[in-house]
Amino acid sequence: MKAPGIVRAAVLAALAVATPALAQQKQAPPAPAAPRDFRLPTKTSFALPNGVEVTMVPFGMTPKVNVQVVLRTGNANEAANEVWLADVTADLMQEGTTTRTAAQVAREFAAMGGSLNVAVRSDESSFGTDVLSERAAEAVRLLADVVRNPRFPESELPRIRATRLRQLSIAKSRPQSLADERFAQVLYGDHPYGRTFPTEAMLNGYTVESVRRFYQDNFGAARARIYVAGVFDRAGVEQAIRTAFGDWPAGSPPATLPAPRQPTTREVALIDRPRAPQSTLYVGLPIIDPSKPDWIPLQVTNALLGGSFGSRITSNIREQKGYTYSPFSTVRAHYRDAHWVEIADVTTSATGASLKEIFAEIERLQKEPPPQGELRGIQNYIAGVFTLQNGSREGLINRLDFVDFHGLGDDYLTSYVKRVYDVTPADVQRITTTYIRPDAMSIVVVGDKATVESQLAPYRPVVP
């Protein structure tokens, strides 16, 4: 038996001989293939006489199907004293129907290979499932029962309220949530988009009658779209939809919200968190919505500026300065409204310096277009992410819903990649100059007031 030292020496000697040879054999990875435009599978679209719109798309080869019932209602339909009532309504809708208990609903979805998934957003609410292909028609009928015939059991409301109260307490303890709430207030004021959290009194005041009224006012065929994507029997699923949803009363059409106000001056808001080691920054402003021609160039500009790991702001305040770990910018869209915001948790002592660098990167992009190579890297990133997002049943439905909600047309999807690559360096400079203007941006900071307030002085608007 060889001594361990001898074996170790032999291994090292062998590696020393082999390493040059391995280095010579190592080759550069092949260049990535040119991104292709998205090809939307041939879809079937129709509308029921009561107003329900239906889109069915064959997708993939896995024997599963995703079915989503999307309602044009959400938090934006709540009154000022009803924040989260849409969420409580959706919670209670999951507690059984007039013919099934919650346990029975869960067991039936599980037997189909899926589960009930519910989401409430600002402008929409969705009820969906992902089941085995042969159970698609059954899933449609069960979803129809959940959406059309909720039981609203009063016995479950105290538990739901208690859960929501815990969620509220947790959210209000987090600086990111506080910053998000204040930023919405700054941008939207008393508009529904400006409301983020309810008070405890609001939550405790919601009754089954409150829920039933919200449901009656906001649910119905006139606000519904149904999406089906995956492997399924088209004729069988279509018949199930017509039977299960065809006699659903139309209800009221989608509410028309007033246009949000546009801030005319910069506002700087500071929420004190004594001795906080970090400051949470929200910096942004209203911009164009997805229906405008500059929307896709804006997506490219955002990704280059702050919306990707290789973006300029991220490189600056994360990689070069070390002020933060995970900054990012994003574009958030509502119906005929959107805003751009840069978000970062930065070291408290670097709060002012971080703002300075964020604005400097914006101004640099306004003064000179980016190099073509830098832009191409961002375009490759966006095209790749777009392809990945369309690579699942649920992802495809999300894209179709986005197109329908904003009235964009199918060519938005099929020409998206091409339009991303059509964006030029001059376009990026123009978009930044036109829409992402530091002088119009509002700033929200959650941090230690004693340390941060003086750092914000250069950014506060000058009072005449």
Image (tube, grey):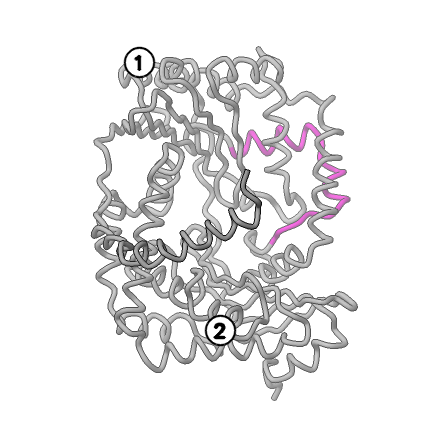
Figure check: 323 above or below 130: below
Figure check: 5 above or below 307: above
Q: Residue drawn at (36%, 17%), measured in percent from left and top? A: 133
User: Which residue extends farthest bottom?
Assistant: 464
Figure check: 422 above or below 435: above
**Helix, strand, or loop for circle 1?**
helix
Q: Could you tell me which quadrant the C terminus lies in? A: bottom right
Label 1 Cα neighbours within 10 Å, binned few <14 / some 14-19 / many ≥20: few
Q: Which mark is residue 148?
A: none
**Helix, strand, or loop for circle 2?**
helix
User: Which residue extends farthest top?
Assistant: 99
**Residue 386 in picture, x, y percent from top left:** 33, 48
Q: Tell me the distance, in whole angstroms, between the alpha carbons under discs 2 and 1.
A: 56 Å
Q: What is the three-letter code of the residue carrying label 1?
A: Gly
Mark toward the viewer: 2 or 1 = 2
Relative placement, left or right, of 76 versus 131 is right
**Residue 59 in picture, x, y percent from top left:** 29, 29
Label 2 Cα neighbours within 10 Å, binned few <14 / some 14-19 / many ≥20: many
Relative placement, left or right, of 232 versus 3 is left
Specify the segment rendered in magenta: 195-218
Q: What is the three-letter code of the residue carrying label 2?
A: Asn
Q: Which residue is mark 1?
A: 236
Q: Which residue is mark 2?
A: 316
Q: Residue drawn at (21%, 31%), measured in percent from left and top? A: 42
* Quarter holding residue 445: bottom right
Q: First in sequence: mark 2 or mark 1?
A: 1
